[in-house]
Image: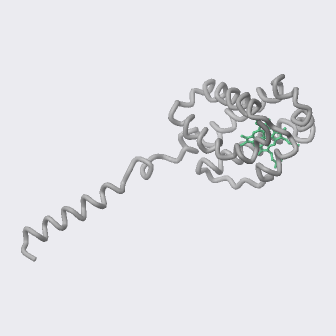
């Protein structure tokens, strides 16, 4: 191979490698962009406070009973631990699976929607940007099939 062919082969190889470096590879983990445990616990604290007083959710007797078996400080700890882990933080979630902790709660599509809109209020309150909110909703959304058990 002559020199010019070698150079063009090298350029092509370089071009092929550089396209694999995309934004996702270089972005800071979502955990850090949410402000780490400090940011996450502030949002979760506000979120759980909203959920436990929500009349639409408490109309469901199973959800209402869950407020006693899992009091707010316990839920705040567990949900923060989970969010920390799934956003790339240093925590290890040690609670029950989403299926095991929600199967008996008879959660509907509508109740899921109520939860999501309360979650958004907490994220807005702490000025989490739209991009980070969307990323977080995509991650949380994956638990829906384990949590919602009726239309
Ligand atoms: C409509 C939506 C939801 C409702 C009404 C709801 C309600 C509840 C209730 C009442 C409990 C306590 C259950 C009991 O003690 O019997 C619980 C536990 C829990 N929930 Fe949810 N939840 C919802 C969605 C979610 C989502 C989206 C997440 C996180 C992605 C989540 C994370 C947890 C965790 C980590 C626990 C504690 C598990 C354990 O005890 O180890 N929940 N939830």
Q: Residue at x 86, y 40 (%)?
A: 105
**47 with respect to 57 (left or right):** left
Identify which residue, 121 or 46, lies in the foreground.
121
Q: Is residue 34 above or below residue 98?
A: above
| Residue shown at 82% from the left, 28% from the top | 57
Q: Quadrant of residue 106?
A: top right
Q: Quadrant of residue 74?
A: top right
- Say how the picture is coloured: one colour
Camera-nearest residue between 106 and 83: 106
Q: Is residue 72 left or right of residue 15?
A: right
Residue shown at 13% from the left, 67% from the top: 7
What residue do we see at 70% from left, 27% from top? 118
Residue 81 on image: x %, y %: 71, 47
Name the spot of residue 40 as percent of width and height, x first: 65, 38
In the rendered image, residue 80, in percent from the top left (x then y), is placed at: 71, 43
Q: Nearer the viewer, residue 56 or 68?
A: 56
Q: Quadrant of the C terminus?
A: top right
Quadrant placement of the N terminus: bottom left
Determine the quadrant in which ligand 1 lies: top right
Toward the viewer: 102 or 14?
Answer: 102
Compared across the picture, whether 138 is left or right of 28 comes to right
Q: Determine whether 42 is above or below 25 in the image.
A: above
Residue 15 in the image: x percent, y percent? 25, 58
Query: In the rendered view, does 127 fall on the left or right side of 5?
Result: right
């Amino acid at each position: 191979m002559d020199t010019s062919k070698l150079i063009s082969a090298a350029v092509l190889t370089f071009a092929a490698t550089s396209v694999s470096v995309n934004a996702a590879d270089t972005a800071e983990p979502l955990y850090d962009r949410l402000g780490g445990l400090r940011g996450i616990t502030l949002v979760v604290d506000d979120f759980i406070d909203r959920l436990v007083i929500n009349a639409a959710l408490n109309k469901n007797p199973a959800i209402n009973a869950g407020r006693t078996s899992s009091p707010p400080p316990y839920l705040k700890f567990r949900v923060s631990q989970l969010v920390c882990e799934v956003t790339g933080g240093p925590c290890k979630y040690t609670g029950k699976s989403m299926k095991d902790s929600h199967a008996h709660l008879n959660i509907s599509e509508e109740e899921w929607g109520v939860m999501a809109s309360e979650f958004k209020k907490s994220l807005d309150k702490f000025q989490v940007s739209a991009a980070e909110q969307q990323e977080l909703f995509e991650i949380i959304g994956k638990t829906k099939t384990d949590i919602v058990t009726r239309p």
